[in-house]
Image: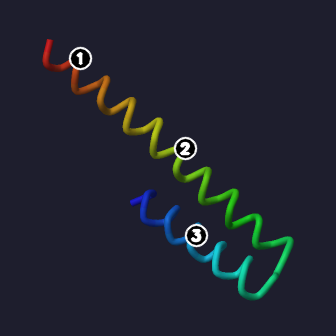
């Protein structure tokens, strides 16, 4: 779910940054998108490690 949210924010940032030339608050969207990707990455890693521990 965070992948979709992050992707949506990244696309919205791209559209608003390069078509409307808005600054400031647009960078918050970029920060949130990158944050969601990082959070999802670490959650996936933790889930994979947990599943591997159950298999042993």
Question: In 3D space, how far apart are the residues under numbered discs 3 and 2 (Cα atoms)?
Answer: 14 Å
Mark sitting earlier along the chain (1/2):
2
Tell me which residue sits at (70%, 81%) in the image. Answer: 16
Q: So how many labels did they put on this image?
A: 3
Residue 8 position in % (x across, y down):
51, 71
Q: Would you identify the image quadrant in which residue 50 lies?
A: top left
Relative depth, front residue between 22 and 42: 22
| Numbered mark located on residue 53 in the image | 1
Indicate the secondary structure of the residue bearing disc 3: helix
Neighbours of disc 2 within 10 Å: few (<14), some (14-19), many (20+): some
Neighbours of disc 3 within 10 Å: few (<14), some (14-19), many (20+): many
Tell me which residue sits at (76%, 72%) in the image. Answer: 26
**Residue 44 vertical placement versus 55 (above, below):** below
Tell me which residue sits at (29%, 30%) in the image. Answer: 48
Looking at the image, residue 56 sits to the left or right of residue 26; the answer is left
| Numbered mark located on residue 16 in the image | none
Relative depth, front residue between 54 and 9: 9
Between tags 3 and 1, which lies in front?
Answer: 3
Residue 36 position in % (x across, y down):
55, 53
Mark sitting earlier along the chain (3/1):
3
Residue 45 position in % (x across, y down):
39, 31
Tell me which residue sits at (13%, 18%) in the image. Answer: 55
Residue 24 position in % (x across, y down):
86, 71
User: For the C terminus, which image quadrant?
Assistant: top left
Indicate the secondary structure of the residue bearing disc 1: helix
Question: In 3D space, how far apart are the residues under numbered discs 3 and 1 (Cα atoms)?
Answer: 34 Å
Residue placed furthest toward the top: 56
Read off the residue under disc 2.
Answer: 38
Mark sitting earlier along the chain (3/2):
3
**Residue 9 vertical placement versus 18 (above, below):** above
Q: Would you identify the image quadrant in which residue 33 lies?
A: bottom right
Read off the residue under disc 3.
Answer: 9
């Amino acid at each position: 779910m965070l992948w979709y949210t992050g992707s949506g924010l990244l696309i919205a940032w791209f559209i608003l940054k390069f078509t409307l030339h808005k600054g400031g608050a647009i960078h918050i969207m970029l920060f949130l998108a990158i944050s969601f990707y990082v959070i999802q990455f670490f959650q996936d890693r933790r889930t994979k490690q947990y599943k591997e521990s159950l298999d042993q």
